[in-house]
Image (cartoon, rainbow, N blue to C red):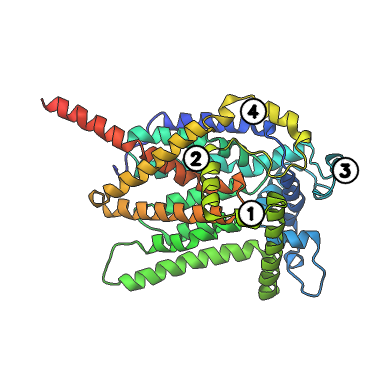
Amino acid sequence: MEKNRKIEWYIPMVIILMSAFYFWGLPSVPFHPDESTQIFMSKDLKILFTDPISLAYHPNQTLSTESRYRAIDAPLTRYLIGAGRLLFDIPDLESDWNWSESWEENVNSGSLPDSDQLLISRISVSFLFTLSLLLFYFSMRRLLPSHLVLLSILLFGLHPLLLLHTRRAMAESGLLFGTTFFLWASTRDNKNAWLIGLALAIAFNAKQTALVLLPVGILSACLVPKTKDYIKTIVLQISRLLVIFILFTTLLNPFFWKNPLGAINISIQERAVLSEKQKEDHLGDSDISIRSIPRQFLAGVYNIYISEPQTEEVGNYIEDIEIQKGRYFSNPVISWGRNLIVGSILFTISLFGIVYHFRNFSKFSNTKKNSLIVILLATICLFLIILYLIPWQRYAVPILPFAVFWIISGFLPITDYLQHGRDNSSTK
């Protein structure tokens, strides 16, 4: 790809229009009860700056609801929501959502956020969409020819899974931003370990599953030109990445400050309990053996390429959000291409993209080769964690930047053929 090529005049306009469409639809997104939990826990931001030690784990105390969430959930989303609420003077949510109670009971107990609480909380995390779109653009303009960059931005910014899952007051906005930031930082010509470490820290502190990208990030930081002090450079690169990752993560997680080993242990225990509960909710009375690798693989592909946007994972409140869903899906853009035919075509095209790049691998510059290795490994790691987790659609969100890259790459054989055809015609 060309280096330092100018930004096409229409790109800023496209990004502005896509951002306007994205934010215009925020209020119409169907409510998810996990939004209540994030809003309820967003009070932690104020405590972080006034009495952070009170957020720490105390082994001799019974684990409260709030402490359990601090043990289980990554903190970034609740801090962003807390910042938005403070900025717009939005009050705390009275209580957390109780999944064992009915919709009406949760409303009566003050667990359902009002329209202002919900909208400001959504804005507080979804503003990251425009930044994600910009980072994705700058990544693609390095990795793809100019005539495919616009198509990649449109496919990414109008992706139905992105439009649903990142417009709620939940972890997916920060997670997508972190993985897109990682894509940009890890494929730059000059590898900056600080940037890669920061991107990984943001992704991890949005959702812990992003930890699978850490070894890919370390590899990327090590892919630097060989010099006389190559070993020293590698050690410095890894050290810088780990320092910023650990420092950022430690500062955002006061739960681990006072008794780190005990807090880590309780966090693992509570995570295991939550995972078992999710399996029960997902599988019901079904045999756990149905979670075979082939089934999980098909479920992963289905969620990334085929399934309609999934507004809920369990059926507790389907009737209560039916009207919201009807309004949301009345816009055809919201679910474009989410069917077996189009999804299968896009999946096949993405496979062509992978094959094309690695059939032509020897023709690329060292920088391009390094970038392709990083992108492929990141794709594999994220897909493997999707296979491991319960096959809920929103877990596929962090792989979207990489999936879109492979889809657009699948068009390269066609554009190359057309380009060579024009060149051959012009020489006759």
Q: Are marks 2 and 3 in contact (CB under 8 Å)?
A: no
Task: Look at label 1 and name its amino acid.
Answer: Leu
Q: Which residue is mark 4?
A: 329
Q: CA distance from mark 4 to mark 2?
A: 23 Å
Amino acid beneath label 3: Glu
Q: Is residue 15 visible?
A: no
Quote the CA–CA distance across marks 2 and 1: 20 Å
Q: Which mark is residue 76?
A: 1
The disc at residue 105 is 3
The CA distance from mark 2 to mark 3 is 39 Å
Q: Secondary structure at mark 4?
A: loop
Q: Nearer the viewer, residue 387 or 396?
A: 387
Q: Is residue 63 left or right of residue 417?
A: right
How crowded is the residue under tag 1: few (<14 C-alpha within 10 Å), some, or many (20+)? many
Reply above or below: 136 against 29: below
The residue that disc 2 covers is: 133
Q: Is residue 57 left or right of residue 387?
A: right
The percent position of residue 97, horizontal first and vertical second, equals 80, 48
**Real-space Cα separation, disc 1 to disc 3, in angstroms:** 29 Å
Which residue occupies 69% across, 31% down? 325
Q: Earlier in the sequence, mark 2 or mark 1?
A: 1
Seen at 40% across and 63% down, the residue is 219
Amino acid type at circle 4 is: Phe
Q: Position of residue 225 (x, y in %)?
A: 29, 62
